[in-house]
Image (cartoon, rainbow, N blue to C red):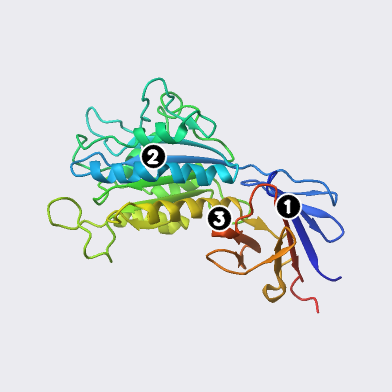
Amino acid sequence: MGSQHSIFTAAGLALMLSLGGCAGQKFGLAPESKTFGHKVEYNTEVDVLLVIDTSGSMAQHQEQLAAQIPDFVAALDRTRLDYRVAVTTMDMGNGGAKGRFVAGPGKAPAVLPFHYPDLSRVLSERVRLGELGGTVERGLQAMKAALTSPNLEYDNAGFLRKDSLLAVVFLSNEEDESVPDDYISFLDKLKPMLATGERSWISHFIGVLPNDKSCNSARWNYRDPGMKYMALAQASGGRSESICSADLHMAVDKIKSRIIEIVTEYSLGDRAANPETIKVYVNGQLLAEDSINGWTFNESRNSITFHGTGVPLPGSMIHVDFTPEGIK
């Protein structure tokens, strides 16, 4: 027995493994075997929830986020993901959203699918929510309320899909003050583990970080790092980025990249690969092993993740060559 090969078409997100047969995984589902040469279709569903702080001093940060929405949407479009986006606030007080999705402007639905006309403009307008909301930021509590009954069956219906990757992005310049709860366990139960061993949810935070000494919580000069949001992001392999970045470009770009990395992670099957033998080709060209613009090997999950410019474009042909562990 020699080497093992895998091929997938990015346009169909199909994967084929040869070693007397073909096997692949559906995103969020268990692997299934196919005869060599047949495609294995992938579920590319991603549900993105933006949880926005609407307390005092947040308008400028909402504006900065809105400016990055077009690039964020364009990057997801290039991967041909079946994504949808919704927005809620951190206001759980009287008159607050309490997890309900923000609707409008105009007749735009609360849940925006990837094919919605002029999505970038509509979503950019939607995250500009102002700063007249409650002064107690309860982002984690609002996230849970958005994803549970009665909101999920009524105001927020049509958002969360069974086999999707759930990506939650929190924007706040304060620490979370939600009712104490095990939000990690809640999300783990809501979205079971992927076949690759990854969580099928990911959390990101744009806010005040403890190591950014020049970043203050508001116009007034004090600091309140979002440690609870950061803990959720760390648990899921998500990103925590500074809200004090001049234009939030880096923060949004890293969040977008992490979502795409999870979606484009591909299992190499049941036989553990010898890391020293792995070679990845895109359209016949050798792709560098590089965590910035190439690929990396996840030994614990026996899978390949693509990064940056190394993420295959739609229609690309990928060939992975490796020797399983234990074979000389």
Residue that label 1 marks: 8
Up-down relation of residue 144 to residue 241 (above or below):
above
Between discs 2 and 1, the one toward the N terminus: 1
Between discs 3 and 2, the one toward the N terminus: 2
Quadrant into which the N terminus falls: bottom right
The answer to whether residue 153 is left or right of residue 43 is left
**Residue count near mark 2 (Cα–Cα under 10 Å), binned few <14, some 14–19, many ≥20:** some
**Residue count near mark 1 (Cα–Cα under 10 Å), binned few <14, some 14–19, many ≥20:** many
Residue appearing at x 29%, y 60% in the figure: 209
Query: Residue 294: percent from the left, percent from the top?
Result: 59, 64
In whole angstroms, how far apart are the C-alphas of marks 3 and 2?
Answer: 25 Å
Of the two numbered discs 3 and 2 in the rendering, the one whose residue sits closer to the viewer:
3
Between discs 3 and 1, the one toward the N terminus: 1
Name the residue furthest left: 220
Query: Residue 4: percent from the left, percent from the top?
Result: 79, 65
The answer to whether residue 298 is left or right of residue 325 is left
- Amino acid bearing label 2: Lys
Residue that label 3 marks: 261
Which disc number belongs to residue 144?
2
- Amino acid bearing label 1: Phe
Query: Residue 67: percent from the left, percent from the top?
Result: 36, 43
